[in-house]
Amino acid sequence: MYKRRTLNPFDRYRIVADHPTYLVRADGYLIRLPEIVPERDLKQARGAAPGTFALRKITKRAPLRILHIAYSSTTPKRKHPLCALAKDGVRTTYRAASIIAAAWLDPAPSPSHVLAYADGDVTNLDPSNLSWKALVLDPSRATIYTTHERQQRREAALVRMGQRPKTAERNAMLIALHKDGLTDAAISARTGIPPSTVARAISPAREHRRNHKGAALDLSHVLRLHAKGTKQADIARRLQVSAALISGVIAKARRQGLINLALAEPEACDFRFPWSREQRR
């Protein structure tokens, strides 16, 4: 992409004040320099408009080396960003067409004007093909809403969206299969629906956390061991689970007030951990 070449002293260039490391040739070609061109290397071009200059004669011993970039051939839609450091030290991005227009066209009449291409070809960046065109907004989108009105419109749109009838019917079928005792993999294999979609559809109807190891623990046994003073690491080692899992189970049981049941009779405290809301009621 980058090719080192020597500038042609007979070409005419312009420099944009905000980006002095770019030379904009008269045909709309961008040339990026490794540094700002010294004023001693510039001279006013004969018979050209003010602000147009040419390079002074360059000797073979000390030619001005540049980075020559062909942006016009690599970005058909002109969305390829050109990065440069602004005067305040902040890196900014801009389009090649915008810097060419800033160099060879008059300033835009107003902020509502955008670049237009005379022949409709966005790859033709010759300054003669560029012009400023007033941007005509859609009258239906020109209304200015307050923050409260914008929130009301957003909530109304969410109510209108809802769930499609086909999606609701599919989700009801998946939930019915789930309540029959089928696993997610079995439901996916039977219906041909991806497992991720199956899991998302039946998640509101789950009674336990999916694939959660704590759901298979005997909570009464864990709490009795904890009440007897057994360390959590020893409990985890005995039940062959992680210490973090045991710590989380005990902390959740303490928040739900189940620690006091730990010293009760095994028959009175023989239940699984109530993960779901239905079991906690």
Image (spheres, rainbow, N blue to C red):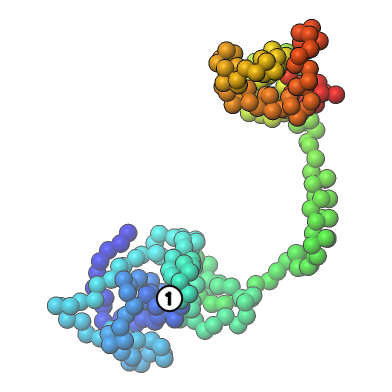
Judge whether residue 242 can be spotted in this image: yes
Please give the residue where the numbered disc 1 appears in the rendered image: 19
Q: Mark 1 falls on what kind of element?
A: strand
Percent from the top left, x then y, of residue 49? 41, 90
Reply above or below: 148 against 53.
Answer: above
Q: Amino acid at mark 1?
A: His
Reply above or below: 132 against 183.
Answer: below
Mark 1 closeness class: few <14, some 14–19, many ≥20 residues within 10 Å: some
Percent from the top left, x then y, of residue 162? 80, 40
Furthest-top residue in this view: 267
In this rendering, the count of numbered labels is 1
Percent from the top left, x then y, of residue 157? 80, 49
Furthest-left residue in this view: 61
Reply above or below: 269 against 146.
Answer: above
Q: Residue at x 65, y 72 (%)?
A: 135
Q: Residue at x 73, y 19 (%)?
A: 273
Locate the N terminus by quadrant.
bottom left
Q: Residue at x 85, y 24 (%)?
A: 281
Furthest-right residue in this view: 281
Q: Residue at x 78, y 20 (%)?
A: 260
> Is 65 on the left-hand or right-hand side of 25?
left
Write down the quadrant of residue 22 in the picture: bottom left
Reply above or below: 231 against 26.
Answer: above
Is residue 236 or residue 83 the one in the foreground?
A: 236
Is residue 16 or residue 114 the one in the foreground?
A: 16
Judge whether residue 195 can be spotted in this image: no
Write down the quadrant of residue 114 in the picture: bottom right
Percent from the top left, x then y, of residue 116? 55, 72
